[in-house]
Amino acid sequence: MHIKNLSKIVDDQLEELKKDWLSEVRKSDYLQTYKSFSDEETMKRGEAVYIYLSDWLKEGATNETAEKYFEKVGATRFNEKFPLTEVQYAIYLLKKIFWNKIDWRDRITGAFETANATKILNVFNDYFDLANFNITRGYFNELLNSIDDDKKMTKEDLKSLLTKGKLDPEELEDEFIWRHV
């Protein structure tokens, strides 16, 4: 299997990938904000990440284009009031679903040869790791801008945006202190 074949898997399996994504979102306890969207809108959000993955692979997988795209996604999700952990978990699920497609095909065809495996895994992981990193950066940039713009960000707002999902806000100390890294 060659790296360019990954884009073909996305293109050929897009309908199935986005339906699998919808199913995972609907089952997950960690994706409550995504559940507030219609099935069509939810699938469209997962589909966008896969389409961008395919385009990214076809164009030569440059990090600069991925950075810009995912920073915009992070800023958009902040403005939509998504908790950051939820957005990161969504990317994890998209990666898991796609990896299962590659793994399933390889078991049948044996095309995922050892010589190419490391290269393919690196490109694949780079995309989703860059996604999470740049989504987080875009999210925090938008968060910081909103604090400067309106000075109305409260401790409860921060707790809602930064501690939902896999974290349990009730287990946090009474004083929530936010520091950027």
Image (cartoon, rainbow, N blue to C red):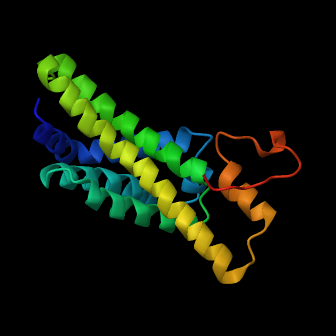
Horizontal and vertical percent position of residue 131: 39, 50
Horizontal arrangement in the rendering, residue 52 relative to residue 139 (left or right): left
Residue 110 appears left or right of 104: left
- Front position in the image: 57 or 30: 57
Q: What residue is drawn where x is 28% and y is 38%?
A: 124
Q: With respect to residue 50, does 20 lie above or below?
A: above
Left or right of residue 93: residue 13: left
Identity of the residue drawn at 86% across and 52% down:
175
Q: How many marks?
A: 0
Residue depicted at x 69% and y 41%:
167
> Could you say where residue 179 lies in the image, as x and y percent from the top left?
69, 55
* Rendered location of residue 157, percent (x, y): 74, 64
In percent of width and height, residue 181 lies at 60, 52
Q: Quadrant of residue 81?
A: bottom right
Question: Vertically, is 28 above or below 55?
Answer: above
Looking at the rendered image, the quarter that the N terminus falls into is top left
Confirm whether residue 7 shows in the render: yes
Could you say which quadrant of the image residue 154 lies in?
Answer: bottom right
Out of 106 and 17, give the one closest to the viewer.
Answer: 106
Residue at point 75%, 41% (across, down): 168
Q: Which one is in front, 127 or 11? A: 127
Which residue is outermost to the bottom? 149
Residue lying furthest front: 181
**Residue 38 visible in the displayed image:** no
